[in-house]
Image (spheres, helix red, strand yellow):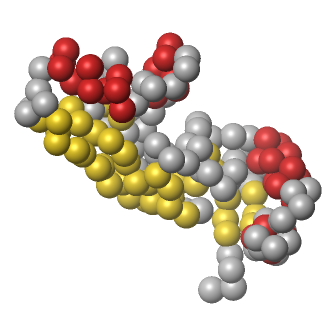
């Protein structure tokens, strides 16, 4: 079990074995625990200023993080982390946070998004248009809604 996630301790004020029991209950309810554990380990030391791929399908630099803990077993357990990035805000547990992707991978994802039947209704045709979203060769993304 990793001891930190985005630099925040997974548990506070409880023994490791007790924390592991609650951690497995809240975090490891996924079907492939070994694979999910490896996924979490990727973000053990990720910090403000690092890039991640957000639920928008775009890479964003982390500009802020807020941990959310719950009280369990006489201590606190990390339940979620809200990430503020340059391309929007995401919840670590509810959004699809991944390591940064390449320009080609992001462009392929955008092409797939735009083929969705509801893309125009949801505003994806505007959000992912070249006038609004610029993907640089190094994987950084700039979104400009005319501000």
Residue at horizontal 46%, vertical 45%? 92
- Is residue 99 left or right of 62 when viewed as pictured? right
Q: Is residue 70 above or below residue 35?
A: below
Q: Quadrant of residue 119?
A: bottom right
- Residue depicted at x 32% and y 55%: 66
Which is more toward the observer, 3 or 113?
113
Tell me which corner region of the image, top left, top right, bottom left or bottom right, holds residue 80: top left
Q: Quadrant of the C terminus?
A: bottom right
Residue at 49% across / 17% down in the picture? 33
Left or right placement of residue 41 versus residue 51 in this view: left
Is 33 in front, or is 5? Answer: 33
User: How many labels, in total?
Assistant: 0
Q: Is residue 82 left or right of residue 7?
A: right
**Going by the image, does 113 lie left or right of 64?**
right
- Furthest toward the bottom, the residue is 147
Which of 77/110 is in front? 77
Is residue 52 at all visible to an observer of this figure?
no
Residue 37's place in the image compared with 84, above or below, is above
Taking the image as drawn, is residue 87 in sight?
yes
Q: Quadrant of residue 1?
A: top left
Task: Give how far across and how far down residue 50 sits, in percent.
Answer: 48, 45
Looking at the picture, does residue 10 appear above or below residue 97? above
Query: Which percent across, then down, holds residue 47?
Result: 39, 43
């Amino acid at each position: 079990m990793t001891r930190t996630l985005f630099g925040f301790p997974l548990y506070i004020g409880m023994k490791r074995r007790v924390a592991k029991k609650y951690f497995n209950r809240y975090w490891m309810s996924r079907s492939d625990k070994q694979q999910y554990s490896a996924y979490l380990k990727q973000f053990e030391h990720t910090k403000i200023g690092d890039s991640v791929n957000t639920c928008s399908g775009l890479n964003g630099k982390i500009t802020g993080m807020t941990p959310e803990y719950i009280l369990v077993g006489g201590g606190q357990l990390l339940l979620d982390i809200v990430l503020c990035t340059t391309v929007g805000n995401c919840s670590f547990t509810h959004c699809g946070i991944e390591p940064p992707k390449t320009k080609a991978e992001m462009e392929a994802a955008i092409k797939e998004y735009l083929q969705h039947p509801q893309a125009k209704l949801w505003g994806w045709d505007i959000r992912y248009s070249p006038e609004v979203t610029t993907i640089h060769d190094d994987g950084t993304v700039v979104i400009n809604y005319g501000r």
